[in-house]
Amino acid sequence: MNLVKNTASEQSLIIQSALKQAVSNALEKKRRLGQYAVVWENNQLSYKGNDAPEVTPNK
């Protein structure tokens, strides 16, 4: 199987940059407000922040 890597278009790079900035701003706002954030990390949900709930993984 041959894999072909296409380079991203200029428009998609601009959109990606805007989305990264929006997520960064939202996470920073939650941090300043003392709220926890839910993120996808290591193929599972992860709660980040001082007031994050303690969750045991389902296995």
Image (cartoon, rainbow, N blue to C red):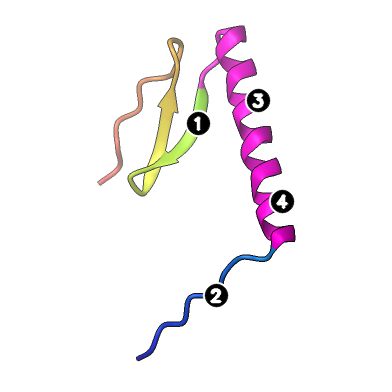
Quadrant location of the N terminus?
bottom left
Do the residues under discs 3 and 4 have CB atoms within 8 angstroms? no
Residue count near mark 1 (Cα–Cα under 10 Å), binned few <14, some 14–19, many ≥20: few
Closer to the chain start, of discs 2 and 3, is 2
**Residue 35 location, x and y as percent?**
56, 14
Which amino acid, by three-letter code, is at mark 4? Ile
Q: Is label 3 in a helix, a strand or a loop?
A: helix
Q: Which residues are magenta?
A: 10-36
Q: CA distance from mark 2 to mark 4?
A: 17 Å
Q: CA distance from mark 3 to mark 4?
A: 15 Å
Q: Nearer the viewer, residue 37 or 3?
A: 3
Q: CA distance from mark 2 to mark 3?
A: 29 Å
Closer to the chain start, of discs 2 and 4, is 2
Q: Is label 1 in a helix, a strand or a loop?
A: strand
Which quarter of the picture shows residue 7?
A: bottom right
Question: Image point 48% across, 36% down: which residue?
Answer: 39
Q: Nearer the viewer, mark 3 or mark 4?
A: 4
Q: CA distance from mark 1 to mark 2?
A: 32 Å
Q: Nearer the viewer, mark 1 or mark 4?
A: 4
Closer to the chain start, of discs 1 and 4, is 4
Question: Image point 68% across, 34% down: which residue?
Answer: 22
Do the residues under discs 2 and 4 have CB atoms within 8 angstroms? no
Q: Nearer the viewer, residue 22 or 9?
A: 9
33 is higher (above) or lower (below) than 42: above
Residue topped by disc 2 = 6
Residue topped by disc 3 = 25
Q: For residue 15, which numbered disc appears in the image?
A: 4
**Residue 43 location, x and y as percent?**
36, 49
Q: Nearer the viewer, mark 1 or mark 2?
A: 2
Query: Residue 58: within the magenta?
Result: no
Which amino acid, by three-letter code, is at mark 1? Val
Which amino acid, by three-letter code, is at mark 2? Asn
